[in-house]
Image (tube, rainbow, N blue to C red):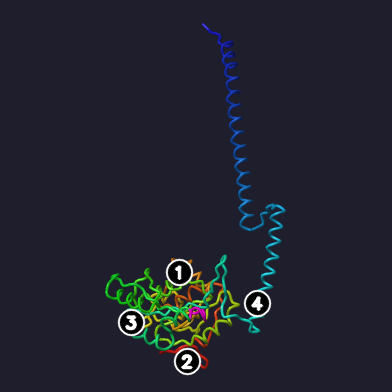
Amino acid sequence: MQIREGPRRGAASAARSPMSAMMLAMFATMASFYVAGRLWQDAQNRVYLIKELDRRTGQGQSAISVDDTLKVVACRQQGKRLASLEMELAAAKHEGFVGKYTYETNGTNSRKRPLIVIGIMTSFGRKNYRDAVRKSWLPTGSMLKKLEEDKGVVVRFVVGRSANQGDASDREIDEENRSTKDFMILDDHIESDEESPKKTRSFFANAADSFDAEFYAKVNDDIYINVDTLSAMLKEHWDKPRVYIGCMKSGEVFSESNHKWYEPDWWKFGDGKTYFRHASGEMFVLSRAVAQFISINKSVLRTYAHDDVSVGSWLIGLAVKHVNEAKLCCSSWPSGALCSAL
């Protein structure tokens, strides 16, 4: 017996057709959202990349107000005026119109800015050297104060602290300083021959923080200085905002550990093993801006085996004027020199 299923099959097909259409519509809607989302994301990425390219290449344009534009113009005019005044000042100094040293005014109080702060590097057990300096060129007592007030020259023996703070070495220095009042004691430095570069760094940082002078000098405690000749020489360099003055030299980098001038970081100076140009460590001078740079960056300034090389390394990458001054070649004592070995 044959059973007819035609009408029922048609009814099932009719039921499935709306379901298929609904599923197809859902898939089409989801696909539309997906495509729209991707297009939006791509557009956002393009906007970001364009902005980043403009920022890095400096081509992005930004609108500024009229007030900001006027401020920019005013700053440029002031800059031109300042440059003109600096040229006039340099010309006046060249003609000899130079005072002893400058004044700074703060409200009703005025004070003299020191011409130079001289740090004499000394250490424990070298009192005989310090006494020789005091007898030869460094005044004591009231005359030391007079040197500061009349000539703007501040001089201090520079020494750190003992590894065993408060021991006999520290007490001897403290007692000597109570009598002479001519020390700069670096409480943040442990006195050691191997740490002389760090000591020099600490001196310039502390001196720049303590004295707002025109120049700062490092000198060994076995060197004689003609203060008047030094002052006259410095006045020739007042028009240089960043200056490094000394007996410039170079030399071999020694990689042998048993050598007197052994440099542990010798490999950093290249295959030629030659130091870059730097001032001899017996005596050299830095201008105020350079000393302030050392003070600000003292925690990140790398030191080498010798203090003169260390200072030279800090300045080699800066816009600093290197002045090879024969008068500061203390060992050779050239004609007109202002320093010599005691």
Q: Which residue is mark 2?
A: 333
Bounds of the magenta segment: 147-153
Q: Spot the residue most to the left.
A: 168
Q: CA distance from mark 1 to mark 3?
A: 26 Å
Disc 2 vs disc 4: which is toward the camera?
Answer: 4
Pointer 2 with pointer 4, Cβ within 8 A: no
Q: CA distance from mark 2 to mark 3?
A: 31 Å
Q: Position of residue 91 (x, y in %)?
A: 67, 80
Q: CA distance from mark 4 to mark 3?
A: 53 Å
Of the numbered discs in the image, which one, if any, rests on residue 258?
3
Reading the chain from its start, which is encountered first: label 2 or label 4? 4
115 sits left or right of 267 in the view: right
Question: For numbered disc 1, what is the local secondary structure?
Answer: loop
Question: For numbered disc 2, what is the local secondary structure?
Answer: loop
Q: Which residue is mark 4?
A: 89
Mark 3 burial class by Cα count in 10 Å: few <14, some 14-19, many 20+: few
Q: Position of residue 138 (x, y in %)?
A: 43, 84
Task: Work out whether 259 lies above or below 17.
Answer: below
Mark 1 burial class by Cα count in 10 Å: few <14, some 14-19, many 20+: some
Q: Which residue is mark 1?
A: 301
Disc 1 vs disc 3: which is toward the camera?
Answer: 1
Q: Spot the residue most to the bottom.
A: 335
Residue 173 visible (yes or no): yes
Q: Which amino acid, mark 4?
A: Leu
Pointer 1 with pointer 2, Cβ within 8 A: no
Residue 308 visible (yes or no): no
Q: CA distance from mark 2 to mark 4?
A: 33 Å
Question: For numbered disc 4, what is the local secondary structure?
Answer: helix
Reading the chain from its start, which is encountered first: label 1 or label 3? 3
Q: Which amino acid, mark 1?
A: Leu
